[in-house]
């Protein structure tokens, strides 16, 4: 008997084998004592981090730095990321942009992004390169970028407007006037794969192109959870608002952090009749269509070949996105 499809792999940015070691964030003396042997992830002002590069391919590990090169103790602004059997990991955020050769690489939906090559390293973005990094690196880079983006939005107190200071090595924002504390925010967003109601897993999937996306780009539908709203209700509302389709059988698949700037993507699947007319949200959705399983499989096959996408070709979400994991799992399932 055919079973409802499930995610076939862990989403790229959900992978991590680093202990976040929350108890150490308030143990200043212990962290300072361990600092000289710690390792540091550096992130530049464009949100990139270096990975080893031999001129042809990158290493799956991050190019971390020895903490001692930054001083005898953690410098101001250093962020504690966690610990492994090898020791502690920190992040230094918003370092100067590396200087070197600029390479143009395929990014989201095949659009070109720039990476810097310097000193045997390539500075890469999480969105484009997150799936190529090992489990430890994926967790460290994702956490560092999430904290960096939160710090940029936590400069003033929401209660009194006073200037806030980051404490507990990156994990608390404390108001300098009223001493009110805030903690890193994560905004829940639902991302839902809608397939038709033929059989268990359907024969077609509903994909859309956002108004600002390149031609050929398609993905599943997504939106932020509103106050007082359940996740399932959000999935139904967003799909109705964006493409005018009523869905049922909303079920959970998995999740992935998405620090652009501070989301957690909550993956769901749902069913809908293809007989319903598509009504696109003006200014938000440029196109929406039903695609067969064979069309999606062919798009995956094209994407696995190197080179620029052919004009008009169906472009699927990048490898770092949970949307791609969801689509691949559906494409491999039986109807």
Image (cartoon, grey):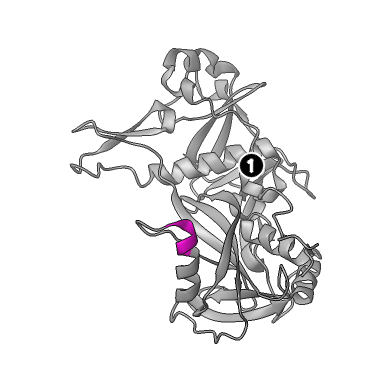
Give the total of numbered labels: 1
Q: Main secondary structure of the magenta part?
A: helix
Relative to the observer, which residue lies in front, 37 or 312?
A: 312
Give the labeled residue for mark 1: 138
Q: Position of residue 189 (x, y in %)?
A: 48, 57
Q: Is residue 146 rendered to the left or right of residue 8?
A: left
Query: Would residue 203 be found to the left or right of residue 240 on screen?
Result: right
- As helix, strand or loop, the secondary structure at mark 1 comes to helix
Q: Nearer the viewer, residue 306 or 209?
A: 209
Relative to 162, 51 lies left or right: right
87 inside magenta stretch: no
Depth order, front residue of 122/134: 134
The x, y position of residue 177, in whole percent, is 18, 33
Q: If the image is split into quadrants, where does the C terminus sit?
A: bottom right
Q: Quadrant of the N terminus?
A: bottom right
Instruction: Give residue 326's position: percent from left, percent from top.
Output: 67, 60
Determine whether 102 is above or below 173 in the image: below
Q: Look at the picture and state if 331 lies above or below 89.
A: below
**Neighbour tally class for label 1: few under 14, some 14-19, many 20 plus, Cα within 10 Å:** many
Q: What residue appears at the point 56 percent right and 81 percent down from the top-left corner?
A: 287
Q: Tell me if residue 62 can be seen.
A: no
Q: From the viewer's perspective, is residue 203 above or below residue 82? A: below
The region drawn magenta spans 230-234
Q: Residue at x 50, y 34 (%)?
A: 92
């Amino acid at each position: 008997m055919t079973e409802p499809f499930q995610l076939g792999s862990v989403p790229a940015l959900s992978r991590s084998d680093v202990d976040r070691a929350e108890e150490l964030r308030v143990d200043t003396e212990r962290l300072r004592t361990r600092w000289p042997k710690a390792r540091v992830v550096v992130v530049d002002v464009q949100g990139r981090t270096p990975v080893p590069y031999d001129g042809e391919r990158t290493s799956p590990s991050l190019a971390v730095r020895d903490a001692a090169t930054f001083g005898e103790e953690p410098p101001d602004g250093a962020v504690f990321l966690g610990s492994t059997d090898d020791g502690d990991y920190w992040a230094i955020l918003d370092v100067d942009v590396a200087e070197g050769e600029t390479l143009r690489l395929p990014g989201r939906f095949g659009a070109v992004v720039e990476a810097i090559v310097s000193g045997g390293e390539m500075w890469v973005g999480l969105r484009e390169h997150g799936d190529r990094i090992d489990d430890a690196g994926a967790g460290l880079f994702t956490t560092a970028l999430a904290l960096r983006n939160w710090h940029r939005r936590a400069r003033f107190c929401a209660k009194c407007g006073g200037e806030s200071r980051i404490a507990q090595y990156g994990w608390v924002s404390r108001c300098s006037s009223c001493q009110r504390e805030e903690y890193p925010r994560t905004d829940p967003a639902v991302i839902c794969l809608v397939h038709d109601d033929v059989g268990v897993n359907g024969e077609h999937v509903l994909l859309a192109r956002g108004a600002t996306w390149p031609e050929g780009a398609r993905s599943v539908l997504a939106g932020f959870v509103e106050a007082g709203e359940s996740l399932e209700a959000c999935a139904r509302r967003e799909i109705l608002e964006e493409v005018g389709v009523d869905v049922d059988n909303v079920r959970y698949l998995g999740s992935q952090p998405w620090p652009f700037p501070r989301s957690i993507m909550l993956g769901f699947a749902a069913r809908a009749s293809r007989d319903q007319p598509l009504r696109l949200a003006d200014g938000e959705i440029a196109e929406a269509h039903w695609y067969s399983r064979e069309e999606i499989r062919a798009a995956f096959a094209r994407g696995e070949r190197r080179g620029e996408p052919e004009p008009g070709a169906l472009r699927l979400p990048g490898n770092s996105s949970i949307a791609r994991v969801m689509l691949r799992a559906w494409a491999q399932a039986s109807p």
